[in-house]
Amino acid sequence: MNLPQMFGENVFNDQVQKETLPNEVYKALRATIESGKRLDVSIAGTVASAMKKWAVSKGATHYTHWFQPLTGLTAEKHDSFIEPEGDKVIMRLTGKSLTVGEADASSFPSGGSRVTYMARGYTAWDPTSPAFVKEGTLYIPTVFVSYTGETLDKKSPLLRSMNAIDKHAKRILALFGRQCKKVSTTVGPEQEYFLVDEEEFMRRKDLRLCGRTLFGAHVSRGQELEDHYFGMLKPRIVDFMHDLDEELWSYGILSKTKHNEVAPAQHEMAPVFCTANVAVDTNMLTMEIMKKVAQKHHLACLLHEKPFEGINGSGKHNNWSMSTDDGFNLLNPGDRPEENTLFQLVLAAVIKAVDDYQGILRASVASAGNDHRLGANEAPPAIISVYLGDQLGALVDSIVKGVDYVPVKVEKGSIGVPESPIFPKDATDRNRTSPFAFTGNKFEFRMVGSQANVSDANIVLNTIVADAFACFADELEEAKDKEKAARKIIARELKAHYRIIFNEDGYGPDWEHEAARRGLLNAKTTADAVPVCFEEKNIEVFVRQGVYTRAEAIARADIQLENYCKIINIEALTMLEMVKRDIIPAVSDFVANLCTNVAAKQSVCEELPCSGEKEIITTLAGLNDKACSLTGKLEGELKNINLANVGVASQAMAHSVIPLMDQIRECVDKMETLTSSEYWPYPTYFDLLYSVNN
């Protein structure tokens, strides 16, 4: 395999564009991609013709406008290149077909921003994200809007938020004498996932319908030995990862790192940073490819945040930064951050943004799946805080408290033997318990769920930081002494938002109480997190930065709550079906068999010891009866919930339905440990977690 040659072979990338487009057309297209210049629609026909010719050479017969509706997934409608010409057909892609498409918008979520009878929707080409060929189809990344202009996707507001960052970051940079064509947010979303045997997966209704196990007694060996993390890759996993890398590389996806994660059967893939909208597209494609490659190896790839109770779940650490087109990183503190006013101002803007809008930042990662993960000892708590580390923490402390800054002395590391190389130590450690941690020249937002579309988190980050930049730029542009004014803003804002900075253990028992004392939000469920999105302040920041209209902001919050209710409802109905149709009958049969055995023994000799069996019979019969009773309560609770009223319904799901489901699970999991494996109707955690990794 010639990796450099095959990398990006399925992508209509810069190299292909340069080779297939006339020079003037190529320059015009690259100006849009690299500098944010308005797309010259007159070049669309030429680009479309070249793109079609290239795609056909790769075996493509169809094209599709690939978009990201508010389902959180991707969508596509395929059209062939063929057009009639007399008795024959020709292969054609017109400029209009490239730039604009039509899709039926009536069946996609809109949150009430589009009435049902107005079904028409439009897709529009996003030239900043490269097209690619997959499985005989040319995929053209697009945005998706309704007939009346409301955005119905996740990419449109992401692009708007990137534009807001670009606009106001350039204002800040200009005040410090630095000019550039474009400021882009860059993202590197790490991707955690589980791999289980496909045959075992197919036997679990809950995994197939819900993506997670609704039942499962703890396996005797979980992650307590800490031997799976970075452990040796098993042969079947090696083969999967090898094929996955090759597939990702062929689509120009910069898959860099692969390793075992903490939990049994859990793994991680991490890419190299790229521009935010491209990172979103490639991450959505990565998740799709992971599942398809897994199937080829008779595996099932689980992307749910918490597929197994009692062991670590999966996240998607969102590494976020800002860079100019000439490579200047706005979050690089440099060798002497105490003298770097521009960096301090950018840092103050980020801290201000996260504190002012902690509610919508928390809401951006809220989901039914992520609720199971946040706050456990594998993910940050549901409380938003900023970790700066020793070096920047000391710098901020000196500014806030008005004391001299003592630079953190960076020493070289060694294990103390002459054969060992001397390694450079970073100026600060990495805090794995923090939801928003500074890690050298970027922030790592660690709350994002593993199956999430990372647009949501980055839309909020871009918008709120752009708003802080705008606020600072408005003030500085009126100041005569820019340096003095900037220092004043830095000190004022760091003092005002000092409460959001927390450089200690986010898992510590005292942090929740301390966070409450500081006035920080602690929304532990989606039902409690999302309502802040309806607050005027949180709507207005999106409107002010041109990211959402008021209607769009409200609609997306409604959709988030609606989706939450639907997922919990599906899980509850699946649980009821599994318990009533499979688990209760299986346990009843096992109890009956034990009773028959006890009766047979005692018919031979009444003095034969059967106390242990009788105890199991009594316990299981009681648990089975309890399960019957609880399922009745759960059915009654579900019937009383009006899913049309998502605000009330989400509260009922979070605080009534889920606690009942937890009780049923506790009951069933106890029964699993007492029931013969011959009778138990589903693969156990041992079957699922160790069928691939042994």
Image: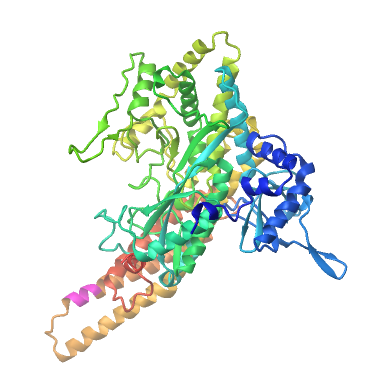
Quadrant of residue 684 within the rendered picture: bottom left
Q: Nearer the viewer, residue 83 or 107?
A: 83
Residue depicted at 13% across the width and 84% down the height: 608
Give the image location of residue 4, x and y in percent: 51, 51
Give left or right: position of 489 versus 161. left
| Residue 105 shows up from this direction | no
| Residue 373 shows up from this direction | yes
Question: Is 619 inside the magenta-drawn segment?
Answer: no
Span colored in magenta: 612-616
Q: Nearer the viewer, residue 289 or 681?
A: 289
Give left or right: position of 89 versus 557. right
Residue depicted at 38% across the width and 41% down the height: 381
Q: Quadrant of the C terminus?
A: bottom left
Give the image location of residue 578, x and y in percent: 43, 70
Above or below: residue 257 compared with residue 77? above
Quadrant of residue 264 within the rendered picture: bottom left
Q: How is the image coloured?
A: rainbow
Query: In the current view of this chain or complex, which residue is farthest to the top?
Result: 480
Q: Main secondary structure of the magenta part?
A: helix
Give left or right: position of 113 versus 42. left
Q: Nearer the viewer, residue 559 or 121?
A: 121
Give the image location of residue 10, x and y in percent: 60, 56
